[in-house]
Amino acid sequence: MTNTVAPDPSARPPMVPLATLLGRELRGSKSEKPVVRFGHANLAKRGEDLFLIKPECIRVPGNSSSTFSVFAIFDGHNGVSAAVFAKEHLLDHVLSAIPQGISREEWLRVLPRALVAGFVKTDIDFQRKGEVSGTTATLVVVDGSTVTVGCVGDSRCILDSRDGVVSLLTVDHRLEENAEERERVTASGGEVGRLNLCGGQEIGPLRCWPGGLCLSRSIGDTDVGEFIVPIPHVKQVKLSSAGGRLIIASDGIWDALSSEAAAKSCRGLPADLAAKLVVKEALKTSGLKDDTTCLVVDVVPSETVSLPSSPRRNQNKFRSLLFGKRSQNIVGKLVNKLSSVGSVEELFEEGSAMLEERLGSDFPCKTNSSTFRCAICQMDQAPNEGLPVSPSPFCSPTSKPWEGPYLCEECRRKKEAMEGKRPSATAVSR
Ligand SMILES: [Zn+2]
């Protein structure tokens, strides 16, 4: 095969480290799809945790080999209706933002921004109902050995790779722990502070006001403010041919257990037992204080795949060096850094709350010669009814004026409200 120089610099593949290339060779493109096994456990306190398990989704209608699996957790607050709504609609909204008739590689490549579009559409549609609750949402798509995770809130998803390296695939959108999010919320018109008791004493975690929510991103929360955005952090990784285990859980687990502790507590057990054990382990420390939900998903190489020998011993040595000195507070950071030396290949990660950055320059917006499709809600419109999300950066001198991510009137209003550039409908009515 010969390579020709691509005229468009963005189309040129990025430089790939040798280790990654070797990893790809080992993984082998011809290997059979890994098997996905899963289990769940949940204990309700308020009944606001919901989960979704859809193991046999089909990417290409009629093609049974194009299956992928979806797992999700929705931890509702202030009522359960946002969690119910997200469970019912989020996946459909994500999938409807993916163009038909594209290859598996393209499908995986557009999935991160389809997650952005789907999360935002779900939020807009829920807000339209005029109900006040909110929910975290962590949506995990497993296609072969590629795992894509979109999340708002603090329902964490961790990966325990077969090398024994634990990494976070989500970011906790908690005001207390996320300085970047505090800045964003403040800049967009929210106030961040602790609950004030009568005597002036401040208690509890940092919250945003009005509303008093501890999270900086969610679906719903119409009554809190548009600065609580539904734009997900998205991470996409490719597991090694040895597979790995995903643990997706609500904060009932993570308030009691570190990522490492949760992974360790259930190693070696089948997924269904593992999920039960993680919940049991979390309750051991503090009892049932909150809704507690745990999904365990094992991506297991199919029997026909011959396993390459993994550099297990060396990595374990490296881990013990680091974890021997860890302190509780920096475990997350260490764990995250370690993922770059493990055999897991990071394909994509983006957490910005700016829609322009998330929708990309080549979002397929044009349906035919006369209409444009909104990059968020997928509605077709005549070009004079909306505007490109940002006219300048995405229009090369040669392109037509309407090329680039296109937003309809309503989605553009939502975008500006999220950035604090105009009052939301709810802020006006308050
Ligand atoms: Zn729209």
Image (tube, rainbow, N blue to C red):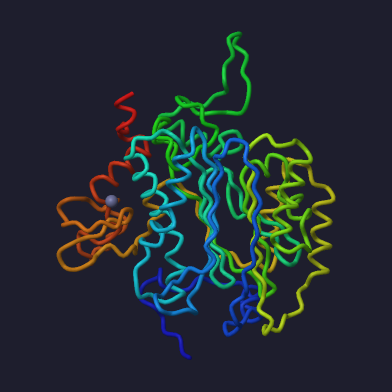
The image shows residue 361 at horizontal and vertical percentages of: 35, 61
The image shows residue 32 at horizontal and vertical percentages of: 60, 82
User: With respect to residue 170, does 397 lie above or below?
Assistant: below
Viewer-nearest residue: 334 or 411: 411
Residue at 69% x, 81% y is 303
On the question of residue 277 being in view, the answer is yes
Viewer-nearest residue: 383 or 381: 381
Q: How many marks?
A: 0
Residue at 63% x, 81% y is 25
Which residue is the extreme one toward the top? 199
Viewer-nearest residue: 90 or 388: 90
Quarter containing the C terminus: top left
Residue at 37% x, 65% y is 98
The image shows residue 398 at horizontal and vertical percentages of: 23, 67
User: With respect to residue 238, does 1 lie above or below?
Assistant: below
- Determine the image quadrant of residue 35: bottom right
Which residue is the extreme one toward the bottom? 1
The image shows residue 66 at horizontal and vertical percentages of: 48, 76
- Determine the image quadrant of residue 247: bottom right
On the question of residue 390 being in view, the answer is no
Q: Is residue 394 left or right of residue 317?
A: left
Residue at 76% x, 78% y is 309
